[in-house]
Image: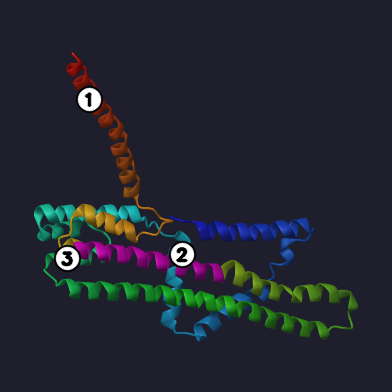
Amino acid sequence: MDLATIVGILIAFGSLYAMITLEGAHVEALLLPAPMVLVFGATIAIGIAGGTIKDFIVSAKAVPGALKGSSYKPSQVIDQVVGLAEKARSEGLLALEQEADKVSDPFLKGALQNIADGTDGEELRMMLEDEIESKTKSGRTASKFFGALGGYAPTVGIIGTVVSLTHVLENLSSPDSLGPMIATAFVATLWGLLSANFIWLPIGTRIRRLTDMEAERMTLLMEGVLAVQSGSQPRILGERLRAMVPSDAPAKGKGKAGKGGKGDKSKAPKAKGAKGKGADSATNKEAA
């Protein structure tokens, strides 16, 4: 679970609260129902109007996942695929059907079942690529929806301010109340800018990032299971999958390989020393 979005939004609103407190103002002056209802209600309504009801439902369902984050770790995926390769190499591809029953991921489960059923490699690749494309398309739809809300919100806030200022101009005969009324009028603009930059745009960006991560995970699994189907050696498969992982997300196996390499180097001086010792013994015998 990655709570970056929740933590970031809380810190942003905390910074706003700190500024209000340091300025000697009151939070209650910003929590006005009228501008908040206009900004949030109209912004979401315009977003729905710009797409379809299905787009709105897909976007709403993506919010909990965006707040929760992703637990994707390339090392775990690689270890899982290498384990499947070892299983298939020792017991055959039909053994993957038993492994499919133990897997909770629908994408990997379906791929293993198709391999056990004898699906052709090219046909399986097309099926998996179509599934990846369908998954990423839903994520892009949700990301665009919240990005659109981030563009609408400031304009809706300005509309609210104009409406409030119109009300202010109707009460010019009461100069004592003009100051508070003008201040209240600009609350709508504030909430428009605030909701766009503190809520809608971060959520849209977060969904796009999680969609990219999910596509990377599914692609890694696809290449792995296709290599298992073709009979790739587990060690070579692991190295190939680690090469697909970006450098900012190193796979777990790299550290072990590096450690092993150092171990081999550390044995070299001992062998050299042993050789040297044998040569000295031979020299001493000749001298004798």
Q: Quadrant of residue 239?
A: bottom left
- Cα distance, mark 1 to mark 3? 61 Å
Q: Residue furthest top?
A: 288
Tell me which secondary structure the magenta stretch mostly adopts. Answer: helix
Residue nearest the viewer, comparing 86 with 137: 86
Q: In screen coordinates, is 166 left or right of 158? A: right
- Please tell me whether mark 3 or mark 2 is closer to you in this view: 3
Mark toward the start of the polypeptide (1 vs 2): 2
Task: Give the x, y percent position of residue 283.
Answer: 21, 21
Q: Is residue 209 magenta?
A: yes
Q: In screen coordinates, is 163 left or right of 69? A: right
Q: Which residues are magenta?
A: 201-227
Residue 66 disc label: 2
Describe the element under mark 1 as helix, strand or loop.
helix
Describe the element under mark 3 as helix, strand or loop.
helix
Residue 113 disc label: 3
- Cα distance, mark 1 to mark 2? 68 Å
Mark toward the start of the polypeptide (3 vs 2): 2
- Cα distance, mark 3 to mark 2? 30 Å
What amino acid type is highlighted by mark number 2? Ala
